[in-house]
Amino acid sequence: MLKQLPVILFSAFTFISFSCQSKSADPHLNKPNTHKEAEAGGIPVNAAAIMARKQIPVLCWHQIRDWRPTDSKTSRDYIMPIAAFKMHIKMLADSGYHTILPDQLYDYLTNGTKLPSKPILLTFDDTDLDQFTIARPELKKYGFKGLFFVMTVPLGKPHYMSKAQVKTLSDEGNVIGSHTWDHHNFKKYQGKDWEIQLDKPTKTLEEITGKTMTYFAYPYGLWNAEGLPQLHKRGFKMAFQLAEKRDPQDPLMTVRRILDSGYWSDKTFSNSIKHSF
Ligand SMILES: [Zn+2]
């Protein structure tokens, strides 16, 4: 019995220090080790440490416009009425949330770098024009920044953002990420698809913004473990899905997000943020 005591104490100690590390987010803890792994470009071997850190809320929007009678119930899940969007963004500001950029999330997850209080990451998918006309001024009102995942095929087409608008978002301090060429399901890519859906959009977006593309969002939030090395190989630092469980072997490539809903009151929205991460 006594012989087992040191083992138990040791286990308890490692457990406690591990938990504290994940909560205190001390930038000095484990830094040289994790930094090297993160820089190596391969699948980080510190996945367990990343999994142990508290998740930071990441929100996701698509279209921001009022519902039409012809919109189905399912499509309404992806359409945020304008007044509801404005109310939810105001709620975030009034509640003391601070928007962060994906580099900050990456540094926090890989190195434990400290974040502002009540950090939150706002993301927008699919290149919809109303993200520029409605979301942009609303975010500006509160000094908020966002991460815009651009699908490149509709750039400049009606109801979608132009290249100049994407550049403006980027120049103003928002981050542009890749959301493929034409939104095909990531799980089905083979052969030339990697070039069409990943390499070419990266080139287009880098030409528009003058910045390196290091963040990716899966169409429909769908991913498979077999495809993740393709993202690492291309230098992506993080990839974003929807609310499914993360891959414990590769949490950076399976960052979780929740869809904000036009059916939610401010209170429901606030509770969803608190309970989903
Ligand atoms: Zn999408």
Image (spheres, rainbow, N blue to C red):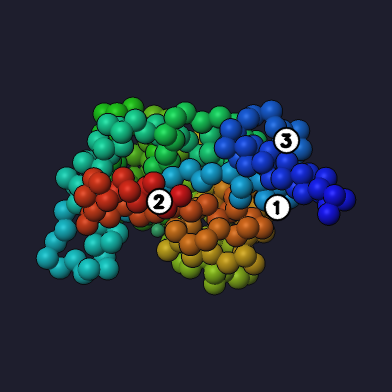
Q: Nearer the viewer, residue 41 or 29?
A: 29
Q: Report the mark closest to the observer, 3 or 1.
A: 3
Callout 2: CB less than 8 Å from ligand 1: no
Q: Which quadrant of the view contains residue 142?
A: top left
Q: What percent of the width, then of the height, locates residue 215?
A: 53, 46
Which amino acid, mark 2?
His
* Residue of label 3: 30
Check disc 1: other Cα within 10 Å, few if <14, some if 14-19, many if 20+. Answer: some
Q: Which residue is at a point 43% across and 46% down the rendered structure image? A: 58
Asked if the residues shown at circle 3 and circle 1 are in contact, with their CB atoms under 8 angstroms apart, the answer is: no
Q: Nearer the viewer, residue 222 or 271?
A: 271
Question: SS for tag 3?
Answer: loop
From mark 3 to mark 1, how far is it between C-alphas? 17 Å
- Is residue 2 visible in the rendered image? The answer is yes
Q: Nearer the viewer, residue 131 or 93?
A: 93
The tag on residue 275 is 2
Q: Which residue is at a point 52% across and 61% down the rendered structure image? A: 245
Question: SS for tag 1?
Answer: loop
Q: Nearer the viewer, residue 244 or 210?
A: 244
The tag on residue 138 is none
Which amino acid, mark 3?
Asn
Q: What percent of the width, then of the height, locates residue 182?
A: 43, 62
Query: Quadrant for ligand 1?
Result: bottom left
Q: Residue furthest left?
A: 69
Q: Which residue is at a point 42% across and 63% down the rendered structure image? A: 220
The quarter of the picture where the N terminus appears is: bottom right
Which amino acid, mark 1?
Ile
Where 153 sits versus 134, above or below?
Answer: below
* Residue of label 1: 43
Asked if the residues shown at circle 2 and circle 3 are in contact, with their CB atoms under 8 angstroms apart, the answer is: no
- The answer to which of marks 1 and 2 sits earlier in the sequence is 1
